[in-house]
Image: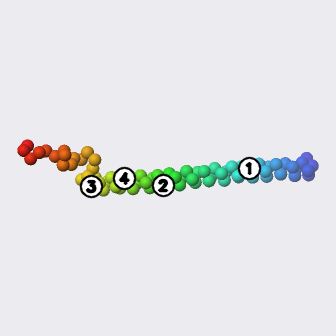
Amino acid sequence: MNEADTDALLEKRLVDLEVKAAYADDLLDQLNRTVFRQQQQIESLARELLAMRQQFSAGNAPGAGGAADERPPHY
């Protein structure tokens, strides 16, 4: 193998590595965006869960019964 062939082979390998690195960078960006969106959803769900727990502990849970569900005084 002569020097020109070796240089061409090295150039091709370098280009292939650069292409792979570009794809890896793109994939990493996509994954970062996905993780960010998931974290936002987790935080939103955690806030909703906290609000529901507070509502439940205050006795205002849905289906827990309110004035309409209480027995009338004549029972």
- Closer to the eye: label 3 or 1: 3
Nearest to the observer: residue 33 or residue 72? 72
Question: Label 4, on which residue?
Answer: 49
Looking at the image, tell me whether mark 2 or mark 1 is earlier in sequence order. Answer: 1
Element on which disc 3 rests: helix
- Closer to the eye: label 4 or 1: 4
Q: Amino acid at mark 4?
A: Leu
Question: Label 2, on which residue?
Answer: 40
Q: Amino acid at mark 1?
A: Val
Nearest to the observer: residue 21 or residue 41? 41
Alpha carbon distance from label 3 to label 4: 12 Å
65 sits to left or right of 5: left
Based on the displayed image, in which of its 4 quarters is residue 50 positioned?
A: bottom left
Element on which disc 4 rests: helix
Alpha carbon distance from label 2 to label 4: 14 Å
Residue 57 is labelled as 3
